[in-house]
Image (cartoon, rainbow, N blue to C red):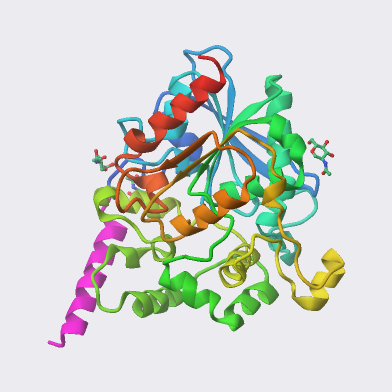
């Protein structure tokens, strides 16, 4: 038999196996069910943004604790609050549970357009206007809404913020455009920080960003980002060749790559059930634009669109050098395809403030999604986060 055909069949068998054969009890659990299954109490809060999106925030309540200090955990692109709950159980791998066990008051936000945040006071998610957003709006509207809501509900004047990937893009955007958040966000821990994507090693991201038609298509089409099975198969065939590679099984892995040693393969199906969790075509287009432009700027709508929106032909930059917070900690992986080390260096050179922490995960191939799924997440990341938080809250 043709070797390629043979490998393709093996690939299909593997795909079939992965997509049908898990009896992991976490497989079908929602964020709330995950929280309750671990003995915590789950609260579901609805936060309304200035532009009328209604976003879901999950709060983990530890019945053994009284009042705790507020910590907001913000997921990345195509993900949800589940990111901080879904890693292999045990050994402190799930930041949500780690912090709640220590009596922190843990809030897990969901960005507009993901499965938990599909409501708007006046727009249905079938309306194309619902989907006219990228991280610009998440930064300008979603984050302030979450932050103000949590401060109001808890009575605290500051909170700790831990963002992953797009969760860091949003916060760098906010801190650079409104310095009043510097005295509120203490600290900002940035996992896999993304402000530029000039050096990405993801072949899919490179090719997609080099295809002007695709970016323009995503932008002019608008609407939710949906990837059909046939499109996915096409992409997988194009980028995986005939390799039997688990990276070919999910769009997230194709975008970010993954790290064999840190991935718990028996749990893949559980991860795939929760991700991709939805976003807009604009959100994807915006990142693709950044690969090409090398800039950290607002979304590019073309000359005329920019003039109408921004009063200038180019989209404005986010002024990273205006950030005055001295409470920023950067955590990054040396094998990250998306938040490449050189992009992180660029971010560091642009920040005019001393960093609270500048931490390269001491593992060769630590990749983007290792900040969510790595078997050693507790050991290399969560322990250090806890130390930083304890210092801030004088524990
Ligand atoms: C998850 O849901 C699917 C479809 O409803 C069902 O076939 C499967 O048995 C469930 N698995 C678990 C582990 O609950
Ligand atoms: C900055 O944020 C503060 C606190 O939420 C808010 O009161 C103020 O209006 C914001 N400033 C701008 C320019 O958006
Ligand atoms: C991998 O996932 C399985 C299924 O959830 C779990 O039983 C096992 O403990 C995990 N292994 C590691 C090393 O975390």
Measured along the vertical axis of the image, is residue 238 above or below residue 226? Answer: below
Residue 360 in percent (x, y) is at: 40, 44
| Left or right of residue 240: residue 171 | right
| Left or right of residue 10: residue 26 | right
**Is there any visible trace of residue 61 in the rendered image?**
no
Residue 271 in percent (x, y) is at: 38, 50
- Residue drawn at x 73%, y 40% is 144
Secondary structure that dominates the magenta span: helix
Q: Looking at this rendering, what residue extends furthest in the bottom direction?
A: 2
Q: Is residue 7 magenta?
A: yes
Q: Is residue 287 magenta?
A: no
- Residue drawn at x 65%, y 51% is 112
The quadrant holding residue 237 is bottom left
- Residue drawn at x 35%, y 30% is 92
Q: Looking at this rendering, what residue extends furthest in the left direction?
A: 1
The quadrant holding residue 359 is top left
In depth, the one of 155 and 267 nearer the eye is 155
Residue 308 in percent (x, y) is at: 86, 70
Measured along the vertical axis of the image, is residue 358 above or below residue 226? Answer: above
Q: How many marks?
A: 0
**Is there any visible trace of residue 310 in the rendered image?**
yes
Measured along the vertical axis of the image, is residue 387 above or below residue 117? Answer: above
In depth, the one of 116 and 318 nearer the eye is 318
**Quadrant in which the N terminus is drawn:** bottom left
Quadrant assignment for ligand 3: top left
In depth, the one of 355 and 148 nearer the eye is 355
Measured along the vertical axis of the image, is residue 38 above or below residue 232? Answer: above
Residue 101 in percent (x, y) is at: 43, 21
Q: Which residues are magenta?
A: 1-22
């Amino acid at each position: 038999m043709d070797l390629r055909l043979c490998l393709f069949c093996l690939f299909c068998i593997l795909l079939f196996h992965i997509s049908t054969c898990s009896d992991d009890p976490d497989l079908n659990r929602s964020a709330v069910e995950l929280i309750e299954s671990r003995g915590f109490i789950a609260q579901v809060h609805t936060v309304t943004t200035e532009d009328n999106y209604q976003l879901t925030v999950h709060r983990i309540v530890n019945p053994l604790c009284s009042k705790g200090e507020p910590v907001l955990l913000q997921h990345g692109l195509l993900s949800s609050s589940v990111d901080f709950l879904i890693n292999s159980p045990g050994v402190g791998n799930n930041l949500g549970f780690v912090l709640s066990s220590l009596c922190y008051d843990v809030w897990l936000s969901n960005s507009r357009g993901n499965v938990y945040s599909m409501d708007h006071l006046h727009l249905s998610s079938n309306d194309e206007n619902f989907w006219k957003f990228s991280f610009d709006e998440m930064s300008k509207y979603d984050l302030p809404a979450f932050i103000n809501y949590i401060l109001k509900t808890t009575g605290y004047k500051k909170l700790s913020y831990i963002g992953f990937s797009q969760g860091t893009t949003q916060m760098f955007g906010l801190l650079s455009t409104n310095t009043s958040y510097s005295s509120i966000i203490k600290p900002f821990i940035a996992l896999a920080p993304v402000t530029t994507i000039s050096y990405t090693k993801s072949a899919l991201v490179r090719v997609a960003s080099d295809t002007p038609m695709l970016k323009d298509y995503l932008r002019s089409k608008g609407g939710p980002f949906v990837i059909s099975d046939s499109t996915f198969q096409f992409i997988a065939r194009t980028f995986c060749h005939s390799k039997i590679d688990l990276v070919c099984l999910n769009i997230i892995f194709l975008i970010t790559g993954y790290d064999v040693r840190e991935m718990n393969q028996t749990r893949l199906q559980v991860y795939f059930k929760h991700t991709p969790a939805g976003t807009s075509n604009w959100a994807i287009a915006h990142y693709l634009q950044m690969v090409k432009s090398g800039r950290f700027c607002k979304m590019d709508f073309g000359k005329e669109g920019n003039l109408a929106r921004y009063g200038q032909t180019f989209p404005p930059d986010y002024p990273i050098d205006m950030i005055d917070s001295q409470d920023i900690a950067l955590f990054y992986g040396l094998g990250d395809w998306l938040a490449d080390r050189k992009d992180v260096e660029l971010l560091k050179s642009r920040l005019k403030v001393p960093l609270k922490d500048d931490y390269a995960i001491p593992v060769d191939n630590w990749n983007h999604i290792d900040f969510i799924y790595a078997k050693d997440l507790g050991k290399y990341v969560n322990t250090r986060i806890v130390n930083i938080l304890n210092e801030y809250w004088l524990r």
